[in-house]
Image: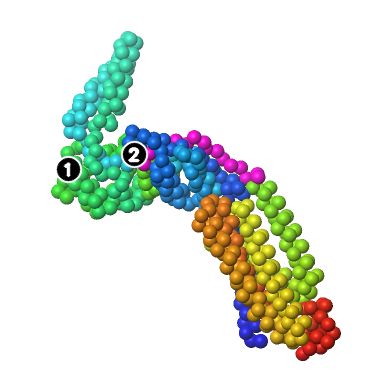
Amino acid sequence: MQKQRSLLALIVVLIIAAIVVIVKFPVPLGLDLQGGSQLTIQVKPNEEIKRITERELEAVQTVVENRVNGLGVSEPVIQTVGQDQILVQLPGVNDPEQAERVLGGTAQLDFRRENAESRAFVNNRQQQIQGLLEEQQKLQSAKERDEKAIAANNAQIEAKIKEITELEAKLFERTGLTGKNLKYAQATPTQGSNWSVALEFDAKGGELFAQLTKELAGTGRRLGIFLDDKPISTPVVGQEFEKTGITGGRAEITGNFNFESANELALQLRGGALPVPVEIVENRTVGATLGRDSIQRSIYAGVGGLSLVLIFMVVYYRLPGLIADLALVIYALLTWATFALLGVTLTLPGIAGFILSIGMAVDANVLIFERTREELRAGKSLYRSVESGFYRAFSSILDSNVTTWIACAALFWLGSGLVKGFALTLALGVAMSMFTAITCSRTFLMLAIAIPSLRKPELYCPSLPASNKAQGAT
């Protein structure tokens, strides 16, 4: 009896803990229930890769998954569509433009050194621009303005600026230090509201970066940091690094970054560079209206089905049925709390798996109570019948649950997206149903038969012959 009281205390503690968890940690919802963003990514060939094969598609999918993981999205769906497209569903992401920026960029990072001859040429052109600007000021401040001269001077300035812009990419030559040498990238705050991206290289990358900065230190030539062949930062290396370069394998990308832009760049760099170009061909926000309707209908269906099951159990199994109903309520609380603790994202198939697992929990109780009735009809005492009912039904319950777990494992391993959600919720529900059926139902039944007024065999088996009722009550 002391053992049953201890188990009852444990069950009470678990119920209280489950209620606290459900209140504190709401279960996140999937795209079909709460809405979010859905993107279709078109994978394109380039000069090196003429045709998109399954290998390239899988490589792009891996990079996209890494970037999505950096966004912190729960239960994303990332799957290939056809021969050259990838479908990405992001529950709870209501900014599709941010998702497009993070997922659509190739993110090929490249560190380059500035060419000395080109630098001298650009300096000369910049001096010419400065002279033209000074001439412009003189023309505009003159008493008699020559509009034609001002227009001609403006045209010369624009031509020089365009010439420098076109030459800017040719100023820098590749050094072999690329994003492949990165270990980590993280957005970090700097002065004021500005942000930068801190980089950490692997061993080879650290050596290349030290050598590159040593070569450029004190020369005035810039270090070009390019992303997808576009310069995002061109710092000058200080003279203090001319002996050893910048060692330690760390660098920092500065620029006009706020938190969002710095974090997006860091996510792209951490996720890796896409091996081929991609294009976002569809980017839409999925509304949650259908989700709310589906949740409401699912709740109605679940509550209605559960109510019918509870009524049936009481009518057919009497006192054991009432105990089973109490165990089912405990099961629902504990299972929902488990979903919240493990961060399970609930989808419509997940709700279906949860409701189906309730049926599995009822099935375990049905097996136990039918075994108990058989023992009572065989003339055994109530206590022995209950004990034997749990003992003899356990192997059947275990076998049925193990086969269900095998099916869940196959669905989770081979399936994707919503199928995985169904498999996970069903597997967790079946595991919890075993606990409530074996532990909670048994504890409550043992406590019930310890009460003299509840020790009547007809409360457990209404059709029991009169001769067996006297034996069962002993």
Q: Secondary structure at mark 2?
A: strand
Looking at numbered disc 2 in the image, what kind of residue is underneath it? Leu
Q: Residue furthest front?
A: 378
Relative height, residue 423 to residue 325 (above, below): above
Residue 289 belongs to the span the image colors magenta: yes
Residue 292 belongs to the span the image colors magenta: no
- The mark tally for this picture is 2
Looking at numbered disc 1 in the image, what kind of residue is underneath it? Glu
Q: Secondary structure at mark 1?
A: helix
Give the residue displayed 52% in from the left and 52% down from the top: 416
Residue tagged by mark 2? 227
Mark 1 crowd level (few <14, some 14–19, many ≥20, 10 Å Cα): some
**Residue 297 image position (x, y, % from top left):** 71, 51
Give the residue displayed 23% in from the left and 22% down from the top: 128
Residue tagged by mark 1? 215
Give the residue displayed 55% in from the left and 57% down from the top: 411
Q: Residue furthest left?
A: 243
- The dot on residue 251 is none
- Is residue 24 among what the camera can see? no
Residue bounds of the magenta highlight: 275-290
- Assess whether mark 1 and mark 2 are in contact (beta carbons under 8 angstroms): no
Q: Quadrant of residue 10?
A: bottom right
